[in-house]
Structures are given as C-alpha cells and as structure tokens.
Image: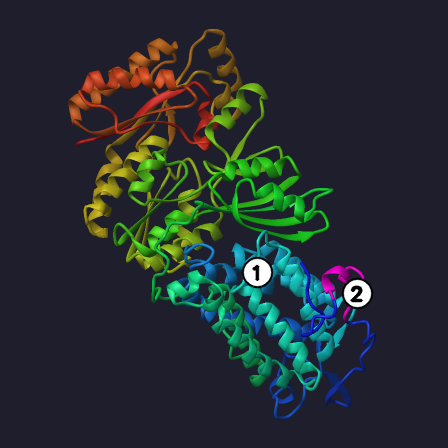
Amino acid sequence: MSLPGDIGGEKNYNAKKQQYNPLQSINSLPSIPGPSVRGRHRPLSFSGRLTTEVFHPLKMKIRCIDGERYRNAFLAGTAALERRREHLNSINVFPVPDGDTGDNMVFTCRSIAEGTRVSRSLAETASSMAEAAFSGARGNSGIIFCQYIHGLARAFGPYPRVDAPAFAESLLFAVPFAEEALHRPVEGTILTVMREWSHAVRRISETETDFAVLLPLSLEDARKSLRETPARMDLLAREKVVDAGAQGFVDFLEGVVEFLGRGSLRHFSLRSATAAPAGSHEHSHGDEMPPFRYCTEAVLHGERLSRPGLIGGLSRYGDSIVVGGDGGRFRLHVHTDRPAEVMDCLSGMGRVSFQKVDDMKRQVEARNSPLSTVGLLTDSCCDLPQELLDRYQVHTVPLTVSSGGWEYLDKLTLKPGEIYTALRETGRTFTTSQPAFGEFVKRYSFLKSCYDSVISLHLSSALSGTWSVSRKAASHAGGERIHVLDSRNVSGALGLLVLKAAEAAAAGKSCPEILEILRSAIPRTRIFAGLNSLRYLVRGGRAGAMAGFVGTMLNLFPMITVDPEGKACSFGRPGSERSNRKKMLDEFKRLTDRHGLDKYSVLHADAPGTAEELAADLEEACGRAPEYTMEISPVVGINTGPGSAGFALILED
C-alpha cells in the first residue's frame, strides 16, 4: 500500500516508512513560556486552571503539540464521539448492519484515554496511547483507528513536541498503517476520510502553522470527504447514509476543534468505557443478513508472525479481515461462520491472549426485526439447540473455559467434541469462569436499545457467579428495564425455562406476564443425569478421591441432580449404567404421574447412543417425544465427563 508524500504524489511513504521520519527537521523546538507564576514561567498545557486563558484561539496561537495537549485533545474527541454513539449505531450498514460501530469506536477511544500514561513528552504519551489502543481496540473501525494511532506514535518517534508542518507529515505517515491492516481496503469508509483529511492538514500547514486555525480549516475537508462517501459506495447510496466509521472519525475531529475553541475540558463529560449508551436508535438500516455470522477478534503473540501471513490465513475463514499491530503481537478481526476453527488456526501460530465473538445475525435481527418487545438473554450453560435459539432470537453470553494457560469461549471457540477428546486422550484439567462484568454491561447496553424490556435467566447462583455478575451489570447499565433471574438449575433444565419464556414472548406476552410464568416454572423444573465415571467429579473437587477410587473399582457410578436451592447433589445410590438408567426412568414416571408433564428434554456428553435409548424409554413412558435431544455445554461436560446422559423436565404443577 502506497501513500503519496504530497498532493501531487511524488513521494512514496510506504516504501520508506521504516527509514523516513517526518520529524527529522525539528530535532528540538524551543520551550514556549506561558504566564508567569510566582516569578517562574509555567509551560503551556491543556490541563489546569490557566488553560482557558492561555489557549483561547483569540488570545494566543498554538504553535506546537506536546504529550499533555495531545492526550487532552484526544479526550475531547472521545467525548464528542460518546455524544454521537447512538447515531453512529443507527447508520451502521457497512461492512454489516450490526448496529455497533458507535459502541465499538467509543469503547476503543475510552480504553485508549483511560489506559494512556500522560507525559509532557509527545513521544512518550503517543507510545503509551498506541499500547492502550492495541489492548482496547474493538470492531472493524476500532482496529483501523488503533492502527492510525499506532502509525502516529511511530511518526512522532523520540520528539517531545511537534510543530504544525511536522504534525501534518506525521498524519500522512500514519495513513498506510491503517490501510495495510485491511485485507481489502474499500473507498468511501473511514480510511478515505482519514487520508483526505491528512492531505488537507498538510496542504493548509504550508501557509498556516497555528493549530487553532489549521485544524478548524482542515475539518471542512473532512466533512466534505464524509459527505461524498455515498458516492463512493453503492451500499451507502442505497441506504441513504454516510459511512458510520467515517462519521465517527469526523465527530472525533469536531470534538478536538471544539476543545481548541474552549481551551478547557470542563465542558466535556467523559463516561466509563463500559458505560451504557442512552436513548434508542433513530433509524434502522440494512435489513439483509451478513454473509458471515460471527464477528471474531483475537490478540495473537508469537515470533515470525507477519501481517500478510495472518491476513492470508484468515482469508480462508471469512471476510472483513483487519490485522493490526506488529513486533510479534497482532490484533485480528474477521467475520466468519467458524470461530472455533479460526482460534484453532491462530493457536497453531502462537499464543492467543484475548478472544471475542459477537453474533452479528442476532444483532441485526434485534435491530431491525425483533420478535418481541421483550429481549431474552441467557448464558452458554443453557442447553437449547441453536435452531430454537435462532427461532426465538435468544441472546447468549458465553462462559470461559481455561486449560494450561489457554482460554476458550464456551460453545463458540470450544465445541463439546473437542473437550471430550481432550478429557479422554490427554487427561488435561479444565477450569471455568463466569463472563466478565464488562461483557454483560455491553450486552445490556445493546439490548436496552432494541427492546422495551429485557429478561435475563442464568444457571444456578449456587453453581456459578454468573447470575451475581449479571445482576450487578444490569444495575450499572440502568437496570429498571432489566430483570435478572436465577434459574436455580443448569443445562437442559435452564434450556427448558428459556424455551418457555421464548414461547411466551413470541406469543405476545408482556414482560410481567413472562416473569410470572418463569417464577412459577422454576420450582417445577428438575434435571437428572447418570455419570459414566467419578473421575471428572473428583478432578473438579465435587467428589473425594477415595470415593472415586472405590466407585471405579466396583464399577459403580453416581446419579446427580440439582436440589430446590440450586445445588448439585447425588440422587439415589451409585450403581451400574443399566441400573442407573432404570432408576432415572422410575423417577421420571413417579414425578410425571404425580405432577403431570409440561415438557422435557434429553441430554448427553458425547454419548448419543445412550441418549437415544433413554429418549425412547422416556417417550414410551409418557407418550410424547422430548422437545429436543442434544449434547451438553462444555462447561457442564467438564464436570460430568464423557459418557453421561440424563433428562430435564418441567412439571405441570
């Protein structure tokens, strides 16, 4: 990717960017004294009480940018972006209409602002900002912006401050860093506006070296470039919107220019990176489903990694590929239907230290064609077939599975079959953890913008901290419209409860009616399973080593259930696989004869044959087939181990 050195295009900065430093002409700029304070000159700064007097453009010219000014201008741009978050979400149609460009850009910029170590030296501040950008980048536009910040840090090099001409050259130097991050750069996007604005700054800086004049003048060029994005991309013209990422970049610049006019940050309200956006979307655009379902991101560490090699590797799995970073650490973004295979591929190249997978299909549905005014959220321990989750537009947040320093997202980057192979063949141990607080805040912020109310139903609080974290996040996100329930159950039992709520929502039931249905059904929901080994309960600390040894020697295996308080406990005496199945069938008959049967499901851990036999026995006993038969979540399967099978049911009374 090449970048002309000036408007005429004589220089190729891409070819020289490793050797050329645009700041070589200003090895040292004289310190500019500010107002005298107790006999001493105070250096100029965008922070502190003196700034409104010093930096008003009518009172003093701004001839250079140092580290403090650079960071404070960034804060002002971020605040402006925050105010426009919902509008950016509402016009997001490219590369897919998943309605999260505003969220991603704000999260990225807030992460940068909060993670930057501020110094008077521009070089030190810019380097810290680039590091924070790498860690906090999110989404397509976020990673592109991250690369732009990274390119600026490279351009600023060792210099403590820059003047206007050097700043302009630095902007041009940074553009190829953003362009090269993409597999197939597209015109009419944030890249176009970045490039054309950078050229405008350089052109104007040839005659105007006061930043307080230069940047407002260049802003007009950025706005013009933004207005022209629909003419450069048919999709934007068809939807009658400008590019959301480009709009966000211009909004950011407008915040910087406004700051220069005011000279103080007091006017700007900066919220947390996890803060929920206020209000709802004004419009819906782009009803078509994205060609790939999952927006997948990762951070990869390793020697001998190259951006072209990573882009080539990811191109086998999807599109919208963005690869940021260098020096053995890269931030990757791809739209794919196979996130687990993507992570397998990356794991073979190096160490994956971060991963994120968003369901764009569900996001588009929620934005443009919600099935109900009530949104439903659950966690990945809800064992409900994907077909039913899709039919009823149920949103899911994954738990995390860890082993040997590696982490996976339950059901997304780790499939059940993989976990059982590892348990059987390698003897690896696995641990699990609830979703992060920020992940729940992000989900609730999104759901509130799409639904009148939200019901969140989670696995038992006695088995995991997921419900507790979800409840706190709902409160943080403004939870008066969010209702977080403890299912006091797990796996297929949780799945049946979510199915019951989903059917009610699809039938037009109100939020209070659905809550009443769930509160009535939770005490009537049970789950039973027969295990094929005590080994995995022993590994997980849920059975003693001696009990496991004795049980294995005698070929006796336990049956487990979840009690009314949501705690896992044994059911009946341990027996053989055959006797355990008979005990479960007898318990099923006893419960359904006494209380009646609402619905039931059959579950297994890598034991489809056993599950099929159990389903046939239960159908014969009650005269109806199960709602579904499926393999359980890896998070649950880690503790039950392969070979287990069981059923869940909701009783009528």
Secondary structure found at label 1 = helix
The image position of residue 113, as x and y in percent, is: 59, 65
Report the mark closest to the observer, 1 or 2.
2
The residue at 60%/73% (across/down) is: 197
Mark 2 nearby-residue class (10 Å; few <14, some 14–19, many ≥20): few
Q: Quadrant of the C terminus?
A: top left
Q: Nearer the viewer, residue 454 or 210?
A: 210
- For residue 20, the mark is 2
- The residue carrying pointer 1 sits among few (fewer than 14), some (14 to 19) or many (20 or more) residues within 10 Å by Cα, namely many
- Foreground: 77 or 536? 77
Vertical order, 228 against 559 (above or below): below
305 is higher (above) or lower (below) than 610: below
The disc labelled 2 sits on which kind of residue?
Answer: Tyr
Residue nearest the viewer, comparing 603 with 231: 231
The residues colored magenta run 12-22
- Characterize the magenta stretch by its predominant secondary structure: loop
Q: Quadrant of residue 494?
A: top left
- Labels 1 and 2: the sequence-earlier one: 2
Quick check: can you spot residue 326?
yes
Q: What residue do we see at 43% from left, 21% from top?
A: 606
Residue 164, how many percent across, how many down?
71, 79
Residue annotated with mark 1? 111
Pinpoint residue 229: horizontal percent, then vertical percent: 49, 68
Instruction: Report if residue 18 lies within the magenta region.
Output: yes
Q: Is residue 163 visible?
A: no
Residue type at the position of mark 1: Ser
Toward the top, the furthest residue is 554
